[in-house]
Amino acid sequence: MVVRSRGGAHGGLAASAVYELGVTTDAEGATLTTLAVTDAPGPWATPLMTLLIFVFAFTSLFGNYAYVGVNLTYLGIRSAQGVAAFRVLVLAAVATGSVLSLELVWDTADIADIAMVSMALVNLTACTLPLRWVLGALRDYEHRMRTGTLAERFVGHENRFLPGDLPGAVWAPRVTEWR
């Protein structure tokens, strides 16, 4: 049973809802999502939406798996036992999530939201920390564009646009030609 509520002041484009808070339906999870999204275009969109929801879920799982895998490597967890434990944990989480009730998933979604916000804050901080270096490199590039010296190599030592010297020998002194 799909619960629908239609409304419209003048019979024009009517808003519709398949799920209403507090109203129990037989549809849950991906089925409920598919019904909600295909309610307006019609039943022809059901196979398309099913495919899109599957692709979204698969790529989300794959992306988060890759993020965690890279972070575990960064943290020094490279052993076969550590990787195996991570894979078992991922499989258990996917299997558990696929059989939980929609109500329980919504009740525990706050944990995932907090984790995603925490990850976003860490990423935003990591993106803003080197901002003065990035802006310095941009000012150097724009200066070389204006003066017609773009063919010269970027120099990371004693560059007046940078807040300091870049470490390492990668940033060679200015030369007029590429070697």
Image: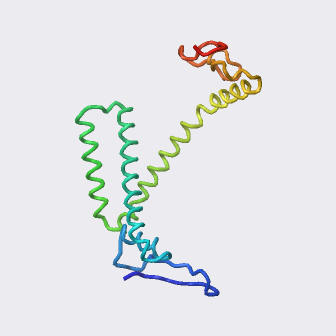
Relative to residue 136, is residue 43 drawn left or right? left
Of residue 134 and residue 54, the one placed in the foreground of this image is 54
Relative to residue 75, is residue 157 drawn left or right? right
**Image-quadrant location for residue 142:** top right
- What percent of the width, then of the height, locates residue 74? 39, 32
- What percent of the width, then of the height, locates residue 160? 71, 19
Location of the C terminus by quadrant is top right
Up the image or down, 9 lies above or below 36; here it is below
How are the colours assigned in the image? rainbow
Of residue 22 and residue 28, the one placed in the foreground of this image is 28
Up the image or down, 121 lies above or below 133; here it is below
Residue found 38% across the figure and 57% down from its top: 57
Location of the N terminus by quadrant is bottom left
- What percent of the width, then of the height, locates residue 44? 43, 74
- What percent of the width, then of the height, locates residue 174? 65, 14
Residue found 40% across the figure and 81% down from its top: 2
Residue found 46% across the figure and 71% down from its top: 37
Of residue 99 and residue 56, the one placed in the foreground of this image is 56
**Image-quadrant location for residue 94:** bottom left
Instruction: Give the number of callouts.
Output: 0
Q: Which residue is most to the right? A: 147
Of residue 175 and residue 104, the one placed in the foreground of this image is 175
Residue found 72% across the figure and 24% down from its top: 144
Relative to residue 167, is residue 101 drawn left or right? left
